[in-house]
Amino acid sequence: MYKSLLSSLLLAGSLSLIACGSGSGGSSSNPPPVVPSSSQAAISSSSSAAVSSSSSSESATSGLRELVTFPVGVAVNAGNETLSLFKNTDNGNNQRAIVEQHFSQLTAGNIMKMSYLHPGENTFYYSHADALVEYAHEHNISIHGHALIWHSDYQVPGWMKSYPGDWSDMLKIHVQTIAGHFAGKVASWDVVNEAFLDDGNYRNLGDDGSIFYQKMGKAYIEEAFVNARAADGIADLYYNDYSLENDGRVKLDAVLAMVDDFQSRNIPIDGIGFQMHTYLDWPSISTIRTAFQQVVDRNLKVKITELDIPINNPYSGSYNFPDNYHPTLTPTLAAAQKRRYCEIVAAYMDVVPEPLRGGITVWGIWDSDSWLINQLFQNNHDDWPLLFDDFFQPKPAFFGVEDGLGYRPCS
Ligand code: XIL
């Protein structure tokens, strides 16, 4: 089991293997808003019925987005995805209600990735993404673009993999055409996603390698940023990766060295995206704080781009499915998750000064739609990593985020 989980993640190219153990900028110099304290309301049961009865001391705020001036985001399904938020179904209606009440930024979970937007060398496909942008703007919601360049095998368009010409020219056209199309419509971009391995080396060969590195060396990263800036002079440009907050620090150090080099040569970069696919027990808050601080020290924005916190951690030493995984979201576990969400948000609020807050985005709306169910747990069992249950009711985790954003103590 452990092996197959690992190999699937290597293929997915997306999660930390060390785990064992970004609005319109949104910055402002306003003081934090005064937040009313929580009052009474029941939380409906989810697929984990045990949570509902005992976690009822909170009520949903009028909207998470109202609590802060920086973007509070969520990743959504859109376009022709099965569970698109635009479906005229109860599911779609519930998604839109939550998005419109609580979030000020959306990231497309998939439909703004490379193969969706640039399926043929001379074909760019914008209809689905444009519809998402239009919907967002109608509701005063900004868009974080994800992602212009990503090695992930399923996301590099087929034509690109066998592109025979000059890769620097090809990358320029790809980045400038897409960034140009969305200029003025997106607040920010993940310009390059996941260019480094956990050991701090550039992702190069192998299943989890990067064809961009193979063809262009590390120059592809800066060329992506230069071209993104040339096509969109305003959007915030992020380098985005997972496990930057890890305890070993090697990966973060490598990214920071790249950033220092960029800054010394005036290569445009506005911030670092921390995916933050974290766990209840990893990494420590002090490690997370240190990582944020290092980015702040460089006067770059910090954006939490893909936050989720599953209950089960398949990398923890004691994990041995099915013997000792948590099959139910008990009140105790839900409370631990609430506290953890709060502590991460509180660390962000404490360490990152307002002008450098690129925002906090959660990777999905309701628990069973989380990518982790499929990619981390291989559909072997449930987990409950997100803020809303399968009945679209806020979980204790939601109130943890609310407390963190509102500068209330984490409980
Ligand atoms: C995930 C999506 O959520 C899934 O629907 C898809 O099958 C795979 O990609 N890091 C990233 C995101 O940068 O693009 C990934 O999104 C999750 C990990």
Image: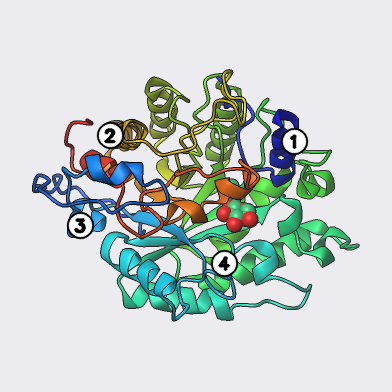
Q: Position of residue 329 (x, y in %)?
A: 40, 39
Given this view, does label 2 or label 1 mark the residue nearer the observer? 1
Dot 2 and dot 1 residues touching (CB under 8 Å): no
User: What whole-number distance in Å separates the C-alpha atoms at marks 4 and 2?
Assistant: 33 Å
- How far separated are the C-alphas under marks 4 and 3? 29 Å
Quadrant the N terminus occupies = top right
Residue, disc 3 = 66
Residue of label 4: 179
Q: Alpha-carbon distance for marks 3 and 2?
A: 16 Å
* Residue 281 percent across, percent down from the top left: 45, 24
Give the secondary structure at mark 1.
helix
Mark 3 / mark 1, whichever is N-terminal? 1
Q: Residues within 10 Å of mark 1 (few under 14, many from 20)?
A: few
Mark 3 and mark 2 lie on one chain; the one further toward the N terminus is: 3
**Residue tagged 2:** 346
Q: CA distance from mark 3 to mark 1?
A: 43 Å
Of marks 4 and 1, which one's residue comes earlier in the chain? 1
Q: Secondary structure at mark 3?
A: helix
Q: Amino acid at mark 3?
A: Glu
Foreground mark, 4 or 3, reads 3
* Marking on residue 385: none
Please give the name of the residue rendered at 48% of the width and 38% of the height, measured from the top-left corner: 276
Q: Is mark 1 within 8 Å of ligand 1?
A: no
Residue at the spot of label 1 = 4
